[in-house]
Image (cartoon, rainbow, N blue to C red):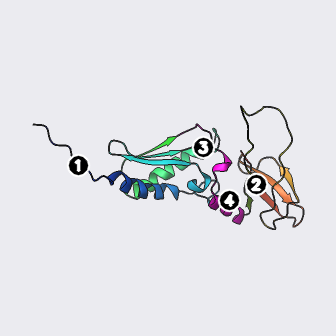
Amino acid sequence: MVAPMARRAPHDDATRRAPAYDVAAATPDPEIPTLTIEDLGILRSVDYSPGRGIVVTITPTYSGCPAMREIAADVQARLNRAGFERVTVATQLAPPWSTDWITREGHRKLAAAGIAPPAPAPRRAGPVPLTLGRRPDSPGCPRCGSPDTALTAQFSATACKSLHRCTACGEPFEAVKPL
């Protein structure tokens, strides 16, 4: 005799997925800890299936992002501590992440931390051109709001950020590059 299939409540998947999403979404970015992976827009989805458990899908800010291994381990550890036993963290590369995916709350948190949020990402119809072009405008100062700023270094502590100085208040600051 074959055992009858266990019945599950129709909302069982949603009741597991929602709390798992909240736990995963609260994971801080290791490079900018004032932001969560949800704020950055790298959290793509959190799904549940009885066969696989919780599956979290994340996208790196760029293909060589060194923080992805740490983010995946942190997401898994947080979900395990929250009582989710089977957790898989998957990486999705396409479509590629864009700074346009940073949430409004993420923009607010960046500015509050003294990091200029990115302008809208440039629109391209095809591949990224490998030619030198006009440098993007410097962002406004996150401290005093002045638009009178200057680029001092193309790279900062991470490849995703650049260094600037405000000519109005004299303060140096980082800015997230629009990608």
Position of residue 139 in the picture relative to residue 7 (left or right): right
Q: How crowded is mark 3: few (under 14 residues within 10 Å), some or many (20 or more)?
A: many
Mark 3 and mark 2: span between their CA atoms?
18 Å
Position of residue 103 in the picture relative to residue 138 (left or right): left
Find residue 167 and report its horizontal and vertical position in percent.
90, 62
Q: In this view, does 141 lie above or below 68?
A: below
Q: From the image, tell me which residue sits under label 2.
A: 175
Look at label 3 and name its amino acid: Pro
Q: From the image, tell me which residue sits under label 1.
A: 7
Q: How crowded is mark 1: few (under 14 residues within 10 Å), some or many (20 or more)?
A: few
Mark 3 and mark 1: span between their CA atoms?
38 Å
Look at label 2 and name its amino acid: Ala
Whichever of labels 3 and 2 marks the residue nearer the N terminus, that label is 3
Residue 107's tag is: 4
Asked which secondary structure carries label 2, the reply is: strand
Range shown magenta: 92-114
Whichever of labels 3 and 1 marks the residue nearer the N terminus, that label is 1
Look at label 1 and name its amino acid: Arg
